[in-house]
Amino acid sequence: MEPLYQGGLKGRSIGLRLRAAFKYGGAVDDSMKRSGTQRRSVWERPAAVARQWIRAEPTAPLLALALLAFLIDLGMTSRSGSIDLRNRVVGARLLLAGRDAYKYHWEEGDPERWADPSDVLPEGETRFTAAPSVHAAYIPVAWMPYPYIRYLWLMVQWVSLVLLGWLMARAAADSASRFAVWFSLVALFALGDAWRLHVERGQVYVIFALLLACAYSAGRQETRKAGILCGAILGAAAVFRPTLGLGLLPMAAARRWRTVVAGVLAGCLVFAAMLPLVGPNDWRSYFAAMERMARSTSGEVAAPTRVRPRFPPVIEGSRNVGRTVGRFAWSNSAVLHVWGVVCGGTAARRWSVRVALAVILVAWPGALAAVWRKKPPTFDALFLMAVTFAAVSEFFAASTRNSYNNLLWFVPVAIWIKQRKGWPAFRGFSGAWLVVSIALANAVLPGGILDHHALEIGGRAGLVLAGDYMLAAFFVAAPLLVGTREEPR
């Protein structure tokens, strides 16, 4: 039997090939199509049709898995309150009202549009962990009823995920590499608990990953304008997630000064443009809140508790605004938390973590500069290190580091696949390490699911924690394996 895509059908759409399979019951070419010979009913040979379809269009099973994942997410969105999304929408509304989101707690008599049933912290503590610039980004949808925002944000997350995969896949040189990129996105990320938790909470890390993919797509052209655009995207992204701006440090180590200057200028321009909405007082309140949260994350002070206020049973027409659904495997892998659990939380240990981060941010680029002065890196190796800088710095943040943060790692995973030309990226010791660490970190695992964020060495959360650090260790070393070029530009 000849393949379905033989002859004039080669390169045609999946729809045309599938219609041909149903019409002729198996392999066809254009001469059969014109003459109408060898016509069979599809029901006579369904297995043959399925085999030919999968062989001709290997993305079909992947599309089916992606559709299944989307339907699961749609069901979760209908039942959950997307509590992190609620947090940011309420922050945008408070910002418009001139209130300090980092000190505000809803009380009876306040507008229900400001109510966040998951906010049960005492005075002086806050559930708002996003930068005020992130709250400002939600202002365009803050006027909408919250149930509509939940479904809109589900679509935004999935569209961003598809665009993320498309941008990284189009950079690959051959079809095998492109398919491997899509496979890793669907099988190792979208089917894991990390993505389920991202959607169920209504998180924003897929947007940050998309910004990194945009910067990579712009900069890989290796021209002056491309370098400037790459830096500008990283600088603008840093206003919303400051750790992303640390990706400019490897650029400086590689003496990509146009990229660095463009990033700094773009960040300053975006910051200045947002001043009418987000003023200096908002940023001071944010950093003060993060300082208080660092003491709590490290275990230096006891976790705050508060009697839940009496929230309305129906908020903006919905009864599930504060509800969470599903039991997801995740672990708080923030260095402050892990060190506090293992060694006990003290102010000295909290400051030692900050000193360690400062040393890393100085010594690491310095070592790279010494290495790259003799053998300048390719852009892939350089950008892989830039994303690694940003992702590793997330471990040192004051707030909780959840498993959905691992979406940032998809960009270096796709670069690694491109450099290894597809499936060889998953072979050998390094490939096995990569697959196992992603599977653990994103909880792409069978078995029972543990809904606990504490450090549990023997539990499933402990496996997620191990995967987080294994994945970080892999990409710290990966740029040394991606390659260097002989002459700088």
Image (cartoon, grey):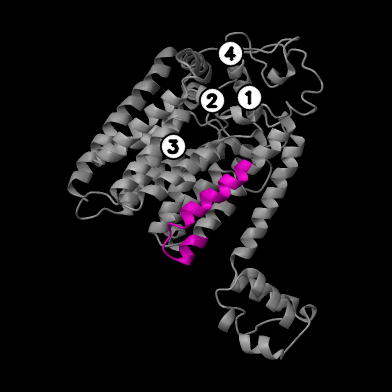
Q: Secondary structure at mark 3?
A: helix
Q: Please identify, in this view, whether the residue under mark 4 or under mark 2 is nearer the observer.
A: 4
Looking at the magenta stretch, what is its main secondary structure? helix
Q: Please identify, in this view, whether the residue under mark 1 or under mark 4 is nearer the observer.
A: 4
Badge 1 density bin: few <14, some 14–19, many ≥20, Cα 10 Å: many
Residue 45, quarter of picture: bottom right
Residue type at the position of mark 4: Gly
Give the residue at mark 2.
130
Contact? badges 3 and 1 (CB < 8 Å):
no
Badge 2 density bin: few <14, some 14–19, many ≥20, Cα 10 Å: some
Q: CA distance from mark 1 to mark 4?
A: 16 Å
Q: Is residue 144 magenta?
A: no
Q: Earlier in the sequence, mark 2 or mark 1?
A: 1
Q: Position of residue 181 (x, y in %)?
A: 50, 56
Q: Is residue 392 visible?
A: no
Contact? badges 2 and 1 (CB < 8 Å):
yes
Give the residue at mark 4.
98
The magenta region covers 156-179
Q: Earlier in the sequence, mark 4 or mark 3?
A: 4
Residue at x 64%, y 59% (from the top left corner): 63
Check residue 391 in the rendering and tell me which mark sits there, or answer none: 3
Q: CA distance from mark 2 to mark 1?
A: 9 Å
